[in-house]
Amino acid sequence: MPLSIHFLLAIFLGAAAPVLTLAVSRPLPGEIVLILLSPRTAREAMLADAGGRAIGPGAVPFAMLAHSDDPAFADRLRAAGAWWVADGRRAALLCGAAT
């Protein structure tokens, strides 16, 4: 393979590593979660039904950070229609959010 392909592959893998780390991280009970959801989702109702609250800066249309001390919080979010729920501690650090 030409050197340029190796270089592009290294850049891709380097950029994909943080995303893959977030993708496989399971949320811990009582910690901040990162939620991906439809922009049409009624966020406040979903969080209230799941027993949590939004935290940090304003949410983007398809993602938000939330917190609950309930161990079943992530499961209830998924049941309510969240596309993906992951450990949000690293994302919260980047956004300057805290519980």
Image (cartoon, rainbow, N blue to C red):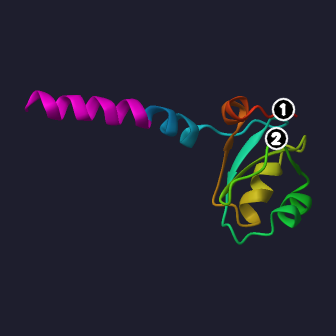
Q: Nearer the N terminus, badge 1 or badge 2?
A: 2
Farthest-out residue, left = 1
Q: Position of residue 58 (x, y in %)?
A: 78, 49
Q: Position of residue 22 (x, y in %)?
A: 57, 38
Pointer 1 with pointer 2, Cβ within 8 A: yes
49 relative to 91, above or below:
below
**Residue drawn at (68%, 60%), measured in percent from left and top?**
61
**In the picture, residue 28 is in which quadrant?**
top right
Q: Position of residue 78 (x, y in %)?
A: 71, 59
Q: Is residue 50 left or right of residue 62?
A: right
Which corner quadrant holds the N terminus?
A: top left
Q: At x 76% / y 50%, what residue is drawn?
A: 74
What is the residue that sits farthest to the front in this orientation? 58
Where is residue 14? Give x, y as percent: 38, 29
**95 vs 86, nearest the viewer:** 95
Q: Is residue 35 above or below residue 69?
A: below
Badge 1 marks a residue whose secondary structure is loop
The vertical placement of 3 against 57, above or below, is: above
Please check the rendered image and state whether residue 10 is part of the magenta-colored stretch, yes or no: yes
Distance of mark 1 from mark 2, alpha carbons?
A: 6 Å
Q: Residues within 10 Å of mark 1 (few under 14, many from 20)?
A: some
The C terminus appears in which quarter of the rendering? top right
- Under mark 2, the amino acid is Gly
Taking the spot 71% from the left edge, 29% from the top edge, the residue there is: 93
How many other residues sit within 10 Å of disc 2, few (<14), some (14-19) or many (≥20)?
Answer: some
The segment highlighted magenta reads 1-16
Q: Which mark is residue 98?
A: 1
Q: Which residue is mark 2?
A: 56
For residue 76, above or below residue 10: below
Q: Amino acid at mark 1?
A: Ala
